[in-house]
Image (spheres, helix red, strand yellow):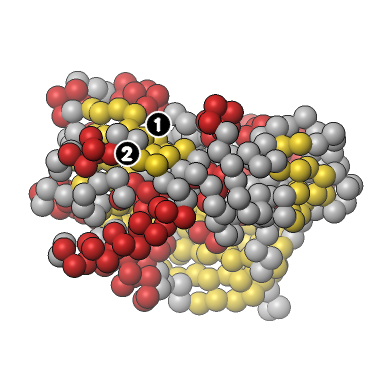
Amino acid sequence: MSGFKFGILSSIARLIGDFFYLDIDKKDYLQSIQPPLLIISNHVSNFDPVFINLAFPELIRFVASDSIFRSFLHRKIFSFLDIIPITKGIPDAGTLRGIFDAKKNRRFSAIFAEGQASWDGVNLPLASGTLRLIMGLKLPILVLNIAGAFLAAGRWRKQSERGEVTIMPSGYIDSKELAAYDEKTLGEKLEGLLAHDEWDWQKRNKKLLRGKRAEYMERSLYLCPVCFSDSSLFSIGHDLVCKKCGMKVFINPYGFFESSQIDFKTMRDWNIWQKTFLIEFLRERYKENKSLLSPENCTVSYGPIRHVSAFTYKAVLSLKNDALVMTSSESSQFFMLKNIRGLNIQKNERMEFIHNNTLYRISFWNKRVSALKWVDAISTLSNRSFL
């Protein structure tokens, strides 16, 4: 990469880092590390690649979802940034070629081993296939931890708010040590080094949040713990309220909950409860063979895998016992749950999946709708042991 190109990108990145009061722990150490190297980090916000890049002396080649390449403009931008695309849910030899190319050219490469950003400030399980990919690369590994970014710029936010972000190295695995590991041992090692709990961090460090602390929190927290409605939560300013029963939660300046109506203190507490309660919620509706979730208006885009969506139509999305249903003005299309693969959530709450070798993207008209609710419900229904 030319010095001029890297200089422009670095200037933009520094502005973002300054907005979040970015603190890089052991920066001299990170600046002294020589590539080739595989960087693995926890994933808590859309700005994580920027934070990581600011800790190193040259542009890092990140592995990212190929969904960001599906428009002409984005394809040009992210190609300029040397992003290595990966298609979620299906094998992708192109990803391996991209990382081996970075290794050959003595570049830094990076991957978020969880495969997606956290929804509640705590690590997700390592993505399927990631360990096999890491072991096949045979590169030394540097593990990083990012703290503070979930509350300030988590994926549930529509707009980031100012908050203090810290990035710190948590471990190093050289090639010799890596060669001695099997997948299970490496997985346990990485999970330990990547472990991060935003709420424990906040309790210890008490970083202030600026701006609207609750806005769009209902993207992550979708079930009311008082009346159990799946479509009535609404955030405004620093409050999360239920329009059906009147429950109200105040988000304090450190991101913790204050309410006389619920016992939860964090988004993590709430999310653990809703994932467990969702099973009972769906079980009762399953017996009635009715729509399992509140229907939502959406725009459906579809086309070949790895390409820009070729066709679109407007529909009402609903969930039945064994199928996802999209009802347009002309017809109803049924997607059997057993045939859905690669189910995931992209930026801006767009839900994607592959069905009969066609990629479908669902964009909700109401930008406060929780795509996570739909993914959690479909995943629960696909595991019939819940019945």
Direction from residue 150 to residue 2 in the image, left or right: left
Any part of residue 129 in sight = no
Q: Is residue 6 above or below residue 138?
A: below
State the image coordinates of residue 363 (x, y, percent, origin top left): 59, 66
313 in relation to 104, above or below: below
Determine the image quadrant of residue 280.
top right
Between disc 1 and disc 2, whose residue precedes? 2
Task: Give me the residue at 47% from left, 50% from top.
Answer: 20
Residue 40, labelled with which disc? 2
Where residue 84 sits, quadrant-wise, is bottom left
Place of residue 266 in the rendered image (x, y in percent of width and height, measured from the top left):
66, 35
Q: Residue 194, labelled with which disc?
A: 1
Q: Amino acid at mark 2?
A: Ile
Residue 212 x/y as whole percent: 66, 54
Dividing the image into 4 quarters, which one contains the N terminus?
bottom left
Would you place residue 364 above or below residue 41 in this image?
Answer: below
Which quadrant is the C terminus positioned in? top right
Q: Position of residue 260 (x, y in %)?
A: 85, 34
**Residue at the image position 46 percent from the left and 55 percent from the top:** 19
State how far apart marks 1 and 2 are (Cα): 8 Å
**Secondary structure found at label 2:** strand
